[in-house]
Amino acid sequence: MSSLLEIKNATLKFGGVVAVNDLSFTVEEGEVYAIVGPNGAGKSTVFNLISRFYDPYSGSITFDGKNLLDRNADQVADLGIARTFQNIELFDHATVLQNLLVGRHRHRRTTMLEEMLFTPRVRREEKRHREAVEEVIDFLDLQPYRNKMIAGLPYGVRKVVEVGRALATGPRLLLLDEPASGLSVEETQDMRWWIDDIRKQMGITVLMVEHDMGLVSGVSDRVLALADGAKLAEGTPAEVQSDPAVIEAYLGAGAA
Ligand SMILES: Nc1ncnc2c1ncn2[C@@H]1O[C@H](COP(=O)(O)OP(=O)(O)OP(=O)(O)O)[C@@H](O)[C@H]1O
């Protein structure tokens, strides 16, 4: 059986900087796979390659056997890949519910004319979107914030809504860009349970970039350590954390 996501010999350069260097890895259906590495290691660039914000200089990327490089960012979302952003990309002056409904937009099958006439098909579609969004709101315990504006919400709640916005699209693969950044110890612990539940209860495969090694070890099946855009080590969290090359890269980064 082929892997859900397959990156083969991907390279991306920005001028003289090789941000991703001949990188290959696979993500299997149903696992939580984490990418770690010091600042500038190329983690965000890998996400941007998968989301199709960047074109690799060489190499291939497939999702469920389909060539992602033939598709643009919208088409990648249509295939079932959703992502969160480190800087949280929500509409501040809309409610939690409205933000999650926007996430459903890609599922719209009705035409503009049908929508203007509010045909039965439009009403059925609308109901389906609302049900899917309400499910995510219940799942992530966002009920108390359902009708609140994003702008007034604590950072930790906005971070969960950001995950909800991605989940509302009904993805098969969820890309989480530093889900714990800016969170307190307790909030990070909660995020760990959410990620666990997303995988176990929703059956969604998760690929995340994360600096918090507690979260990475707690929730990941496999970890990829990057340095200078290349694979330094790959394995279980324990294997990667005890890898001498990883320890040296981290100590080196810490000493810098
Ligand atoms: N748009 C860009 N233009 C030029 N160089 C870039 C661009 N994006 C990233 N880089 C460079 O590519 C390398 C990898 O950057 P990237 O942001 O992927 O690292 P990262 O591991 O995500 O780092 P961080 O943990 O700080 O987010 C760095 O040297 C960075 O300066």
Image (cartoon, helix red, strand yellow):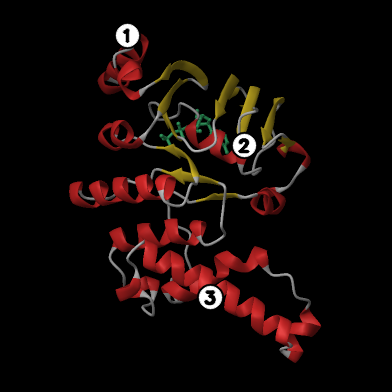
- Tell me if I can see residue 216 in this picture: yes
**Residue 239 placement: quadrant:** top left
Secondary structure under the numbered disc 3 in the rendered image? helix
Q: What is the spatial separation of the Cα atoms under label 2 and label 1, in whole angstroms? A: 28 Å
Q: Relative to 52, does residue 105 appear above or below in the rendering? A: below
Quadrant in the picture for the N terminus: top right
What percent of the width, then of the height, locates residue 43? 48, 32
- Inspect the image, locate mark 3, and give the three-letter code of the amino acid beneath it: Arg
Q: Earlier in the sequence, mark 2 or mark 3?
A: 2
Q: Nearer the viewer, residue 94 or 206?
A: 206
Q: Earlier in the sequence, mark 2 or mark 1?
A: 2
Q: How many marks?
A: 3
Point 67% across, 31% down: residue = 61
The residue that mark 3 highlights is 130
Residue 244, numbered label: 1
What percent of the width, then of the height, locates residue 165? 49, 61
Q: Is mark 1 within 8 Å of ligand 1?
A: no
Point 55% across, 33% down: residue = 46
What percent of the width, then of the height, locates residue 20? 57, 25
Q: Relative to 194, does residue 232 appear above or below in the rendering? A: above
The residue that mark 2 highlights is 49
